[in-house]
């Protein structure tokens, strides 16, 4: 009996046995992570306070100028440099002026990444709602314009739901299947707008474009909405857009395709946008291929003067080094410019789009425990940018 008691009684030593060492390790782990736990608790409490603030009926979301300067926004790249940017645009013209042929031309060039006239094009998948056509007509038109060379990145739909009746869900579904979508064409606005009792006031015009713009912005794509001009002429081409100013007011920009005479092949394309230069481009329609060819531009595309900072940054990524990581202070010393680190970060953030477009350099800033970190890297981009291989009218040679 005594032997049994000795066998069943626990024999816990005071020395460095297994239980003692586990307790010791646990104490070290807690001490090491104590600071991280405090940071997490503070972040969680701040999130709770912000949620309570937003639930207050008087809450107004604001951002300070300092916070705005300290934010690195995602770089937006143009689909067609100097011509078509991310956002929502109206493309208007009188009936049968050649709008759908122009849409097919834009869609084909973007889906294949080939230059359009003298403009550089970024390759992207295109969804074209050709709602006034059928598939046989589209087949004939595309073959007439581009021959037998097709592309898997250009998709057509001849039917769709309306803006308030499910069009957004259809577009979302397509983008989920094709995440590289860059352009959506709706031809025409009338086909996706509700009919029957709708008042075409400034408010309703603004709302229908604003809903499409919100969708395009949420997926960071470009949307072209084809629409008609009115019969009355105006000194300002954009005043000929049919409807109220609410349509253009909600859009990021607009194109107006017009002819002096319906029987001529010559036309002008007027372009305006929030973040781009107004332009007037003269075009001639090729009578054999029915494509629009570039003749001249009244306004040369404005180019920014060289920036010494961007020039210096481009030298950091030499041919044998495709990435650089470090702080703004380290970069400032490396490039040899007398510039404060916070100013350097701000200028790079503001010019991130130009850095990518002109030098193929990506920029990203992030915060670490040791401070603000800058990352610069190069990678191959799907862009046709060899202007030397363009003929005078912009065709690839």
Image (cartoon, grey):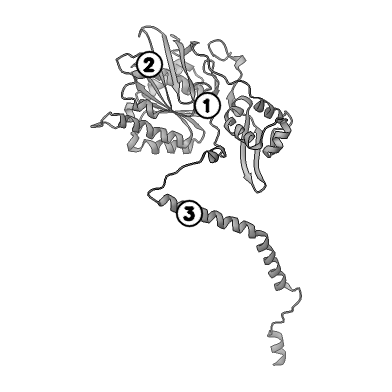
Label 2 residue SS: helix
Marks 3 and 1 sit apart, C-alpha to C-alpha, by 39 Å
Residue position marked by numbered label 3 in the rendering: 49
Name the foreground residue: 116 vs 33: 33
Q: Earlier in the sequence, mark 3 or mark 1?
A: 3
Marks 2 and 3 sit apart, C-alpha to C-alpha, by 51 Å
Whether 31 is drawn above or below 247: the answer is: below
In the orientation shown, which residue stands out farthest toward the bottom? 1
Whether residues under marks 3 and 1 lie with C-beta atoms below 8 angstroms apart, the answer is: no
Residue 237, disc? 2
Marks 1 and 2 sit apart, C-alpha to C-alpha, by 24 Å
Label 3 residue SS: helix
Label 1 residue SS: loop
Name the foreground residue: 196 vs 158: 196
Q: Earlier in the sequence, mark 2 or mark 3?
A: 3
At which x and y percent is residue 244? 31, 25
> Residue 143's quadrant in the figure?
top left
Residue position marked by numbered label 1 in the rendering: 78
> Residue 3's quadrant in the figure?
bottom right
Whether 264 is drawn above or below 231: the answer is: above
At which x and y percent is residue 69? 56, 37
Q: Is residue 292 left or right of residue 2?
A: left
The N terminus sits in image quarter: bottom right
The C terminus sits in image quarter: top right
């Amino acid at each position: 009996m005594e032997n049994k008691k000795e066998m069943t009684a626990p024999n816990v030593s005071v020395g460095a046995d297994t239980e003692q060492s586990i307790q010791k390790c646990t104490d070290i782990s807690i001490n090491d992570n104590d600071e991280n736990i405090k940071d997490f608790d503070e972040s969680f409490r701040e999130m709770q306070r912000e949620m309570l603030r937003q639930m207050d009926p008087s809450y107004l979301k604001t951002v300070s100028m300092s916070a705005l300067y300290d934010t690195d926004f995602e770089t937006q790249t143009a689909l067609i440099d100097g011509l078509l940017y991310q956002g929502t645009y109206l493309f208007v013209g009188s009936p049968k002026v050649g709008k759908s042929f122009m849409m097919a031309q834009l869609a084909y060039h973007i889906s294949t990444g080939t230059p359009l006239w003298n403009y550089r094009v970024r390759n992207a998948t295109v969804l074209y709602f050709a709602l006034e056509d059928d598939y046989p007509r589209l087949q004939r038109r595309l073959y007439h314009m581009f021959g037998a060379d097709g592309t898997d990145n250009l998709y057509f739909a001849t039917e769709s739901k309306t803006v308030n009746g499910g069009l957004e869900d259809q577009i979302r579904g397509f983008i989920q299947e094709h995440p590289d979508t860059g352009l959506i064409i709706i031809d025409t606005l009338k086909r996706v707008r509700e009919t029957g009792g709708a008042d075409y006031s400034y408010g309703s015009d603004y709302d229908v474009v604003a809903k499409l713009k919100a969708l395009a912005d949420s997926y960071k794509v470009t949307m072209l909405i084809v629409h008609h001009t009115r019969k009355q002429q105006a000194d300002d081409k954009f005043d000929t857009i049919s409807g109220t100013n609410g349509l253009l007011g909600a859009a990021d920009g607009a194109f107006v395709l017009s002819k002096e005479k319906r029987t001529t092949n010559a036309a002008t394309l007027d372009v305006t946008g929030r973040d781009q230069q107004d332009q007037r481009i003269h075009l001639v329609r090729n009578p054999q291929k029915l494509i629009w060819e570039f003749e001249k531009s009244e306004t040369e595309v404005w180019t920014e003067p060289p920036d010494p900072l961007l020039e210096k940054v481009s030298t950091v990524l030499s041919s044998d080094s495709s990435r650089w990581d470090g702080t703004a202070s380290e970069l400032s010393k490396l490039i040899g410019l007398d510039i404060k680190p916070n100013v350097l970060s701000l200028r790079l953030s503001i010019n991130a789009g130009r850095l990518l477009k002109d030098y193929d350099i990506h920029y990203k800033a992030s915060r670490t425990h040791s401070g603000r970190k800058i990352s610069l890297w190069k990678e191959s981009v799907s862009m046709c940018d060899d202007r030397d291989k363009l003929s005078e009218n912009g065709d690839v040679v």
